[in-house]
Image (cartoon, grey):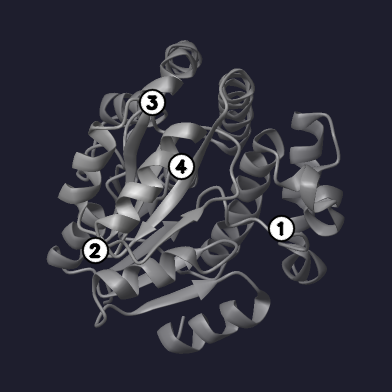
Amino acid sequence: MRKIAFLFPGQGSQYVGMGKESYEVYQESKEVFQQANEILGFDIERLCFEGPEEELKKTINTQPAILIVSWIITEILREKGVRATVVAGHSLGEYNAVLASGVLDFPSVLKLVHRRAQLMEEVSNKVDGGMAAVIGLKRGKVISICENIKEIVETVNFNSPSQIVISGEKRGIEKAAKQLMKEGAKRVIPLPVSGPFHTSLMEEAADKFSYELNKLNFSIPQCKVITNVFASYASTPEEVKRALKQQINHPVLWEDSMKKLILDGIDLFIEVGPGKVLQNLLRRIDRKAEILGVETPSDIDKLEKLLKV
């Protein structure tokens, strides 16, 4: 029996039209979107399918939208008998991992993610911040350069051996980018996000969000969950909650997490949700790792044939 990891994408994977193909085929999709519309108080379904793109890109809308689309695919895979040995999500995607593991139910996670997005956007509105991907420079060099910039700029996403994300004040990112290119980076690419996510600038949001997490009762995970902050398994409700509390203002250890899963014998990785970001990252971490993207009905058909479920 294959050891399967479900991987869930984070902010930046959104696009206008995501989820529409599944909506037209699966009743589960219609039911989840209807429930989400009622919880959020606005038509998230229409925003996903029709945009406009500028509205969908706003943190307050992007985070619940990606959560919903990824959750629909997770539900369909479960109906088809596809089960994960372990789940992991990149930044926002970790909430899909928590949801897939049964620690919290969908209404609770959707409300949490909506509140998370609100708090992160509040901080973003106070700070002229952003994020950028650094291509082709080792993590030690990136960390060292960022530490020597006067403005706040921090290394926050260790995505693969060739990609590290920096985050912070825009002026700090601009200064760091110039120095990184001088030191041998192939490219420094601004990311389509509006805030200094995963940095110390998010401490206020993390403190407020911790209060929201404390309101909820977490269940024991029904499968393994590997967390962004620690790159290790969370096996108790308390461990999951602690990881989520720290996630907003701490780095994402994605490369470390994926290497641990490979070492532990995971032999099939499935990116569940919009886009191909995590597929591309895993191929840079280990070219031999088998990974599939599952987003559309045709993707699900291919996976069923592969697994013969």
Precedes in sequence: disc 3 or disc 4 = 3
Q: Residue at label 3?
A: 151
Q: Residue at label 2?
A: 161
Callout 1–callout 3 Cβ contact below 8 Å: no
Q: Residues within 10 Å of mark 1 (few under 14, many from 20)?
A: some
Precedes in sequence: disc 1 or disc 3 = 1
Q: Residue at label 4?
A: 174
Q: Amino acid at mark 2?
A: Pro
Element type at marker 2? loop
Element type at marker 1? helix
Foreground pick, 73 / 94: 94
Is residue 110 placed above or below 212 in the rendered structure? below
Q: Residue furthest left?
A: 263
Give percent across and percent down for residue 127: 56, 22
Residue drawn 75% across the image and 30% down it = 39
Q: How many marks?
A: 4
Residue drawn 78% across the image and 65% down it = 20
Q: CA distance from mark 4 to mark 1?
A: 45 Å
Q: CA distance from mark 4 to mark 2?
A: 22 Å
Foreground pick, 59 / 162: 162
Q: Quadrant of the N terminus?
A: bottom left
Q: Residue at label 1?
A: 28
Precedes in sequence: disc 4 or disc 1 = 1
Q: CA distance from mark 3 to mark 4?
A: 10 Å
Q: Amino acid at mark 3?
A: Glu
